[in-house]
Image (spheres, grey):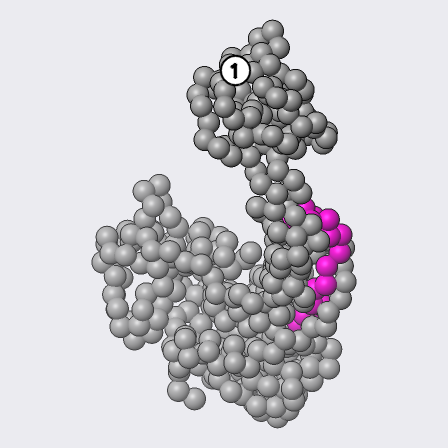
Amino acid sequence: MTAISRQEALDLLLSRAVQAGISEQVNTEEASGRILSEALVSPIDVPPCDNSAMDGFAIPSGALEFSVSQRIAAGSLPAPLDAGTAARIFTGAPVPQGTEAVVMQEDCEFSDGRVKILKAPKPGANIRRRGEDIAGGSVFLEAGTRLRPQELGMIASVGISGVSVFSKLKVAIFFTGDELVMPGNPLPLGKIYNSNRYSLIGLLDSLGCEIVDLGIVPDSLESTVRALQEGAEKADLVMTCGGVSVGEEDHVKAAVDKIGSIEMWKVNIKPGKPFAFGDLSGIPFLGLPGNPVSAFTIFCLFARPFILKMQGASKWQPLSFAVESAFDWKASAREEWLRARIDEEGRAILYPSQGSGVMTSLSWADGLVMIPAGSGMKNGQSVRFYPFSEFLA
């Protein structure tokens, strides 16, 4: 297959991603990272009444000096303002009937039960109006929203204790390569530790997936076929690391073709050109490269948005921003994704070694910069920066 562009590959993946979960009810405090399956409608106004945004004095209109008739703390019920009087009020406290504005205490002189206003306020100053944050009866979170701590706080603010979310996506993973050894075991000559397992599990955990770990699979066609079949029986998505290149010991493509079909095999990017997408009799398959930087990068660029859409999320595009480059880079026929850090001057600097096996570059970096295919980069030019915080959130 001819290598396709990153955008072509992403468009293909997203067109094939089908929401896989069913709706289930969970407690609000347990919903972090989950995706809403139903829109949320607020049963109340937030705030539930007009309240003070400041510690100060609630005053009527028409004067700048008043006797203070009451003290209103948050959670209390105030009486209407008496004619010609003000009320001592605190942040979050309900505003009494007859209030024109709240004057912050720094703009007042208060003594012997009277308050003098030093700076005349505008009508409505420092009053948070009922429902100005969330109106009762309104949709305040749409289906497909991935819930972060700030959304959980908003849900709690309207008194909702449980939400409907999509069930966790089951992802079966396995790793090919007779050279792989699990950490904790001796490392014979010619072997390497299976670092990709830990990176991939961490990435899937960050997306709230349920992981079915099928372990290390020997480099044979029969073993790879069996692992793919087992994964397709147990999960909503099957992912592999390694075995997707064109070597004699790379069996993934042939194995997928035996029980399904390959739709995509190569993407015109670096690192990570050998990236496979296919179908295992109705279960999608993603084959990541074996080199650790390539596997990590391909997951961030392709597997993450594919998984988010399968989970029912309505947003999957990572945020990025333009920064000044502090490096030169030669043009390449492939789109390149380089490990970079933002320096104290806000410029992107590169890790010295950009090899696809250099895992220290991922730990050192703050994110990735993208160099378009056929374009070089000169020191001082603008480059697009994608922070890891976007890919791991």
Q: Using residue 42 as the reference point, say whether residue 247 is left or right of it.
A: left
Position of residue 143 measured from the top left corner of the image (x, y, whole percent): 63, 65
| Residue 32 visible here | no
Residue neighbourhood size for the residue with mark 1, other residues' Cα within 10 Å, grouped as few (<14), some (14–19), many (≥20): some
Residue at 53% across, 65% down: 315
Q: Amino acid at mark 1?
A: Glu
Residue at 67% across, 24% down: 72
| Residue 286 visible here | yes
> Does residue 5 lie above or below 25 as drawn?
below
Position of residue 370 measured from the top left corner of the image (x, y, whole percent): 36, 63
Q: Using residue 360 as the reference point, say whether residue 349 is left or right of it.
A: left
Query: In which quadrant is the N terminus drawn?
Result: bottom left
Q: Using residue 380 as the reference point, say whether residue 84 is left or right of it.
A: right
Q: What residue span does the magenta drawing correspond to?
A: 153-171
Is 241 magenta? The answer is no
Numbered circles on residues, count: 1
Residue at 59% across, 86% down: 279
SS type, badge 1? strand
> Does residue 279 lie above or below 198 as drawn?
below
Is 170 magenta? The answer is yes
Using the image as rendered, state which of residue 173 and residue 206 is in the foreground.
206
Using the image as rendered, state which of residue 257 and residue 206 is in the foreground.
206
Q: Quadrant of residue 382?
A: bottom left
Query: In which quadrant is the C terminus drawn?
Result: bottom right
Residue at 66% across, 57% down: 137
Residue at the disc numbered 1: 65
Position of residue 365 measured from the top left corner of the image (x, y, whole percent): 43, 52
> Does residue 380 lie above or below 129 as drawn?
below
